[in-house]
Amino acid sequence: MNIHAKTRYVVSGKVPSDISKTDFRKSIIGYEISRLEIENCLTDRLVHDLRVEQNNPLIQAGPGSVVFMVSGYDSDPREIYLIPEVVAFMRKANESNPCWIYFAAPESGWTLNAAYCVLKSSHVSAVNPGHRTLAFLTHEIADFIEAQLDDFYELCAIARIRRRKRDGHLKLVIRGFGVIVP
């Protein structure tokens, strides 16, 4: 298994780095989103890197291979989905309908964070020491996932993901929202 750290904006020029020559097959990708990008709502790099195109090298890593990270908020005690700038960034990025369910590692919780930021009904329903329960309306979660399904299947086809692996990943994503899939 290869581990890649996704490069980030060069602060002076705000130019995304070129990843087109990187082989991401069988890789786990650490994808950092900087505070600079978040506070300035610079979603173009993220939207570009999550595009549904044959020549997108991130697709080749396969479903669930990207661990998204937000940098620059380490000393902030709030969860990232409670930071207004992060919410605004995620909402703007989500306007381009990125396929979070394909790219995000299910165990990272990123898809839940994305849903929390973009869905109107989202709220924290319970707080215990070290644990919060995120709540959503069922139809909003269904719409959130359904809006990404066509792209998910297309991305799996581009990456030549076998049906069993594809379906297994999708079950993990759906289970992450508390829905048990047989």
Image (cartoon, rainbow, N blue to C red):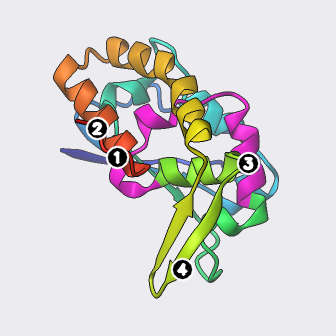
Name the residue rendered at 76%, 40% in the picture: 92
Horizontal relation, residue 10 to residue 67: left or right: right
Q: CA distance from mark 1 to mark 2?
A: 7 Å
Q: Is residue 94 magenta?
A: yes
- Location of residue 122 in the rendering, given as x and y in whole percent from the top left corner: 65, 55
- From the image, tell me which residue sits under label 2: 181
State the residue in front, 86 or 21. Answer: 86
Q: Taking 131 as reference, is 89 above or below it?
A: above
Q: Residues within 10 Å of mark 3 (few under 14, many from 20)?
A: few
Please give the range of residues in magenta.
86-109
Is mark 2 in CB contact (under 8 Å) with mark 4?
A: no
Q: Taking 99 as reference, is 121 above or below it?
A: below
- From the image, tell me which residue sits under label 4: 127
- Location of residue 11 in the rendering, given as x and y in whole percent from the top left corner: 72, 54
Question: Reading the chain from its start, which is encountered first: label 3 or label 1?
Answer: 3
Residue positioned most to the right: 40
Question: Reading the chain from its start, which is encountered first: label 1 or label 2?
Answer: 1
Question: Reading the chain from its start, which is encountered first: label 4 or label 1?
Answer: 4
Name the residue rendered at 71%, 58% in the picture: 86
Amino acid at circle 2? Val
Q: Residues within 10 Å of mark 1 (few under 14, many from 20)?
A: few
Q: Based on the displayed image, in which of its 4 quarters is residue 64 positioned?
A: top left
